[in-house]
């Protein structure tokens, strides 16, 4: 199996506090890889390092054997590595259709043509409809995104991300703040989109990723505590201690 | 998530229309017809002043309402362009259209330079940096040789359009100004409704998300800043032709504040809001002029009431009630 995303000795210090300490991570192509850990384990910091929203203090990141350590966050997105956000990230004043079109528009390259009519964007409408139907938002296509319910916003966010047709998805707590029925729906969706893609997801709860992920990395206090499949992780004494010790699970 | 979920939220559904919606076409047509007969009903210079400020506010709204960037130094482009246009017409003997063009180009270049330095900062810091640069432009206008210091550049000739059509009369000049400002506002409308405008609105709504979709947001911000400065310059250069004057008032920081006021009162992020806001403020200043210094106080009270009663501005409120983008 080939490694798509690789982090070597990734470190982030904030004024003397080491949030992420020499973390190594290898994500295999075509798998769902989960990154879990208790509160304050450095998951989100590590995630922001991988997606270039933070610049690492030390270490190296490679995506498809290309060094991306010094790249901009927009740059890695253009390579096909797209992240989601913990809070739902939609463009609230645009309609559902316009939201998805923003992603499809990327295929044209940058959109600096301010003199053209937006009519030329209607050629993306059919594709956009497809992605929107896919996540069950077909009847909301002309609704203002800001007024959708929380679950629908998350669905729209996924449709927008998929419209970019990314090779790798990085999901930041995709189930955060969701009702049980939504969790199952999103899980099914993630499983489906992972068929021909690589997914790295950050989660707080071990149970959520149990039957979803192929491989799990547990972070605690900025370091890798354990790595393996769910069976191995759930039996690891270090992991049990980290979670119970902090009163999380 | 489930589609069966109850419709508890009041959903806003925008009708899907390709190109300019009929409603907008109708409003623009009514507005144009009104503006054609306006100079025969009111004092043309007053009407021209309203139109120049409407264009200025619309240019500012491109940056604030659609780009999400609050500049507190837009007087620099408005006033800077009026100085350049006035100087070009008076000293270099440029024809009106060329002096307006010279003013606009200078504001565009100024916007490109100041913009590239300001967009590195966000929020209040961005506003402060733009203000600081605008103050530098103000002191330049106060101290430089050609700007005439406290006096400004006075008795600027109105000249002949293309060197043949005389614009000395108020009615002739009025239609020159009408073409420029109405054309400018239509251009701004197109920018907002272009592929570029779509990305711009996305960045305004959620910048990190736009980055994660692969957009180099700073380039878009610089582009919109430059465009906004250019159109503000177009308004300022035209105003110099109307009043035959470029003065310190146009580059003063209070002018930057006034355009914020117009935009917010009318409704930022709406197409027609800035036009309404500009008309309201200019009309007020005109008809309340007899109250002297009280105008500022009345203006302040109206602004406070506006913010308290309808935060989204007059047109913003209408847009919400009608559930249509206006």
Image: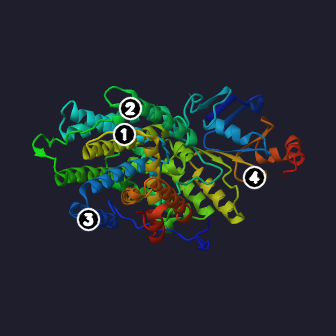
Q: Residue furthest left?
A: B164
Residue A198 is drawn in which quadrant? top right
| Residue A210 in picture, x, y percent from top left | 75, 52
Q: How many marks?
A: 4
Q: Share a chain, discs 2 and 4?
A: no
Q: Badge 2 sits on which subunit?
A: B
Image disc number at residue B241: none
Q: CA distance from mark 2 to mark 4?
A: 68 Å
The crowd level at tag 2 (other Cα within 10 Å; few <14, some 14-19, many 20+) is many
Label 3 vs 2, first from the N-terminus: 3
Mark nearest the camera among 3 and 2 is 2
Residue that mark 4 sits on: A210
Q: Share a chain, discs 1 and 2?
A: yes
Q: Is residue B291 left or right of residue B306?
A: left
Mark nearest the camera among 3 and 1 is 1
Image disc number at residue B79: 1
Q: CA distance from mark 1 to mark 2?
A: 9 Å
Do the residues bearing badges 2 and 4 touch, measured as CB atoms within 8 Å? Answer: no
Q: CA distance from mark 3 to mark 1?
A: 28 Å
Secondary structure category for the residue under label 2:
helix
| Residue A57 in picture, x, y percent from top left | 68, 27
Do the residues bearing badges 1 and 2 touch, measured as CB atoms within 8 Å? Answer: yes
Evaluate whether residue B119 shows in this view.
Answer: no
Q: CA distance from mark 3 to mark 4?
A: 68 Å
The crowd level at tag 1 (other Cα within 10 Å; few <14, some 14-19, many 20+) is many
Secondary structure category for the residue under label 1:
helix
Secondary structure category for the residue under label 3:
helix
Residue that mark 2 sits on: B141
């Amino acid at each position: 199996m080939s490694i798509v995303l690789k982090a070597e000795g990734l470190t982030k210090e904030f004024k003397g506090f080491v949030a992420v300490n020499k973390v190594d991570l290898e994500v295999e192509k075509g798998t769902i890889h989960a990154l879990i850990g208790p509160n304050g384990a450095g998951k989100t910091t590590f995630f922001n390092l991988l997606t270039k929203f933070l610049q690492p203090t030390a270490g190296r990141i490679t995506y498809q054997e290309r060094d991306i350590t010094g790249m901009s966050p927009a740059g890695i997105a253009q390579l096909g590595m797209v992240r989601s956000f913990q809070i739902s990230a939609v463009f609230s004043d645009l309609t559902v259709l316009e939201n998805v079109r923003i992603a499809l528009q990327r295929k044209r390259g940058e959109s600096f043509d301010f003199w053209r009519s937006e009519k030329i964007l209607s050629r993306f409408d059919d594709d956009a409809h497809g992605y929107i139907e896919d996540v069950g938002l077909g009847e909301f296509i002309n609704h203002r995104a800001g007024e959708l319910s929380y679950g629908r916003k998350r669905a729209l966010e996924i449709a927008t991300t998929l419209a970019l047709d990314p090779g790798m998805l990085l999901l930041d707590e995709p189930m955060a703040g969701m009702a049980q029925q939504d969790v199952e729906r999103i899980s099914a969706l993630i499983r489906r989109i992972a068929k021909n893609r690589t997914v790295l997801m950050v989660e707080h709860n071990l149970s959520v990723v149990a039957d979803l992920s192929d491989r799990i990395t547990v972070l605690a206090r900025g370091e890798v505590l354990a790595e393996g499949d769910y069976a191995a992780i759930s039996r690891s004494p270090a992991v049990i201690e980290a979670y119970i010790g902090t009163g999380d699970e | 998530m489930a589609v069966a979920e109850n419709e508890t939220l009041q959903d806003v559904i925008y009708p899907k229309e390709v190109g300019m919606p009929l409603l907008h076409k109708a409003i623009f047509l009514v507005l144009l017809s009104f503006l054609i007969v306006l100079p025969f009903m009111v004092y043309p210079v007053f009407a021209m002043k309203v139109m120049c400020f409407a264009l200025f506010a619309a240019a500012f709204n491109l940056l604030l309402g659609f780009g999400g960037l609050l500049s507190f130094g837009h007087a620099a482009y408005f006033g800077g362009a009026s100085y350049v246009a006035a100087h070009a017409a008076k000293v270099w003997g440029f024809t009106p259209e060329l002096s307006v063009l010279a003013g606009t180009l200078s504001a565009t270049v100024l916007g490109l330079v100041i913009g590239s330095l300001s967009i590195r900062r966000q929020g209040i810091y961005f506003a402060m940096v733009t203000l600081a640069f605008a103050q530098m432009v103000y002191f330049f206008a106060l101290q430089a040789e050609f700007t005439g210091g406290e006096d400004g550049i006075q008795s600027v000739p109105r000249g002949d359009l293309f060197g043949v059509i005389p614009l000395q009369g108020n009615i002739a000049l009025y239609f020159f100004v009408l073409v420029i400002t109405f054309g400018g506002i239509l251009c701004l409308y197109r920018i907002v409704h272009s592929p570029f405008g779509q990305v711009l609105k996305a960045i305004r709504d959620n910048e990190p998300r736009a980055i994660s979709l692969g957009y180099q947001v700073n380039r878009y911000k610089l582009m919109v800043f430059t465009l906004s400065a250019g159109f503000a310059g177009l308004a300022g250069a035209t105003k110099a032709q109307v009043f035959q004057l470029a003065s310190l008032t146009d580059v003063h920081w209070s002018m930057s504040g006034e355009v914020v006021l117009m935009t917010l009162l009318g409704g930022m992020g709406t197409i027609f809001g800035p036009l309404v806001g500009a008309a309201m403020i200019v009309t007020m200043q005109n008809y309340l002029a007899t109250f002297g210094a009280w105008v500022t106080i009345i203006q302040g009270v109206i602004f406070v009431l506006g913010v308290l009663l309808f935060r989204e501005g007059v047109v913003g409120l209408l847009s919400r009630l009608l559930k249509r983008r206006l």
